[in-house]
Image (spheres, rainbow, N blue to C red):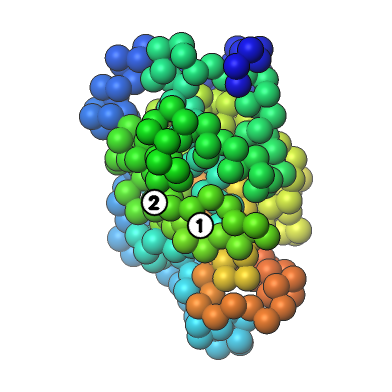
């Protein structure tokens, strides 16, 4: 915003932030050169992954019990940063409704604009407040304002400018992402789409500082709010830190994020978890459906954490 005070991303906000020149960034991201330097992200779960099979069996059991309906598609992804292994990849490349899970992608597009503007666009305190409202509070008004900010500097063609920025700057990350609408009045956003694999690649990239303002994005996504990954999951201790974004409509219940757990010696053990349930027919009761499907996601998160706790001595 014109005349506003620029934010310097430093101190606690930039614990893992790495500064790159504009040239380095364009070479690394635009040409997909530095972005996917080792460690690389596997395309699929490891062969005969026991956890992948366990999650698949769990979802089938929930379908038989009527807890996942016949008109609902699900997608799941888990990546272990310590072992550098994809542990779960179920329907990972299927584009599904994104709902509010698209909001960190919109923030990333904004940061691309800041990074490549040559100083013409600055990350101000007012814009930071917008991003916090968008991600922490899931404000649709703030989301539309950030979409407009991106579009104003990239052609003034609307929401599609956000998608174009993402795919131009990091085509290897946002492969199945589709952004075509602002958040309509009432929050019924059904047309923007992304795959679990896109979320996984994005989370991998910001955890490893492969995208601009990765540290700031991690901070925004870690601010206290409701999640479906760790909150109300009895086996996951309150000591874990969650970097995430939920998505909720009468057709979509999801969460994507990074869980930073610790082993019994206090060493960090981060992993990604993405769970998406898309319903073809609109849920008759939004609140009860969201609550029930949120519990399905928590049950899968519980299964994942219990497995990792057993294998890696997590607390």
Name the one closer to the observer, 95 or 49.
Answer: 95
Residue 120 in percent (x, y) is at 46, 14
Q: Which of the image's four quarters has the N terminus?
A: top right
| Residue 186 rendering spot, x and y as whole percentages | 68, 60
Q: Residue 269's spot in the image, x, y percent?
A: 56, 39
| Cα separation between marks 2 and 1 | 9 Å
Q: Secondary structure at mark 1?
A: loop
- Taking depth in this image into account, of 165 and 120 the one nearest to the observer is 120
Hey, which quadrant is residue 270 in on the image?
Answer: top right
**Residue sitting at x 72%, y 59%:** 233
Q: Of marks 2 and 1, which one's residue comes earlier in the chain?
A: 1
Identify the image quadrant of the C terminus: top right
Label 2 crowd (10 A; few <14 / some 14-19 / many >=20): many
In the image, which disc is placed on residue 251? Answer: none
Give the SS element for disc 2: loop
Q: Residue at x 54, y 75 (%)?
A: 279
Residue underneath mark 2: 177
Query: Residue 14 lies in what quarter of the image?
Result: top right
Eyeballing the image, is 28 above or below 198?
A: above
Residue bearing mark 1: 98
Instruction: Tell me whether the residue at label 2 lies in contact with that at label 1, contact meaning CB atoms closer than 8 angstroms.
Output: yes
Q: Is residue 2 visible?
A: yes
Number of residues whose C-alpha sits closer than 10 Å to that of mark 1, classed few (under 14), some (14–19) or many (20 or more)? many
Q: Nearer the viewer, residue 180 or 271?
A: 180
Q: Residue at x 30, y 14 (%)?
A: 23
Query: Can you say whether 127 is above or below 295 in the image?
Result: above
């Amino acid at each position: 915003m014109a005349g506003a005070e620029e934010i310097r991303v430093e101190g606690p906000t930039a614990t893992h932030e790495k500064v790159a020149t504009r040239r380095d960034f364009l070479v690394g991201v635009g040409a997909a050169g530095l972005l996917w330097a080792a460690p690389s992200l596997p395309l699929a779960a490891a062969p005969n992954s026991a956890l992948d099979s366990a999650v698949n069996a769990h979802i089938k059991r929930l379908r038989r019990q009527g807890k996942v309906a016949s008109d609902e598609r699900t997608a799941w992804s888990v990546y272990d940063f310590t072992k550098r292994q994809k542990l779960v990849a179920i329907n990972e490349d299927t584009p599904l409704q994104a709902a509010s899970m698209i909001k960190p992608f919109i923030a990333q597009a904004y940061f691309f604009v800041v990074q490549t503007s040559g100083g013409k666009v600055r990350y101000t305190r007012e814009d930071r407040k917008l991003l916090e409202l968008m991600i922490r509070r899931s404000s649709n008004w703030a989301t539309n304002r950030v979409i407009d900010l991106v579009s104003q500097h990239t052609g003034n063609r609307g929401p599609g400018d956000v998608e174009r920025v993402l795919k131009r700057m990091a085509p290897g990350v946002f492969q199945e992402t589709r952004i075509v609408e602002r958040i309509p009045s009432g929050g019924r956003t059904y047309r923007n789409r992304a795959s679990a694999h896109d979320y996984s690649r994005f989370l991998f990239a910001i955890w490893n500082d492969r995208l601009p303002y990765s540290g700031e994005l991690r901070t925004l996504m870690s601010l206290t709010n409701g999640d479906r990954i760790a909150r109300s999951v009895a086996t996951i201790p309150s000591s874990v830190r969650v970097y995430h974004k939920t998505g909720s409509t009468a057709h979509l219940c999801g969460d994507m994020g990074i869980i930073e757990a610790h082993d019994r010696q206090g060493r960090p053990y981060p992993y990604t978890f993405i769970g998406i349930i898309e319903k073809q027919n609109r849920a008759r009761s939004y609140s009860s459906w969201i609550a029930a499907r949120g519990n399905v996601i928590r049950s899968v998160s519980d299964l994942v954490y219990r497995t990792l706790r057993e294998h890696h001595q997590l607390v």
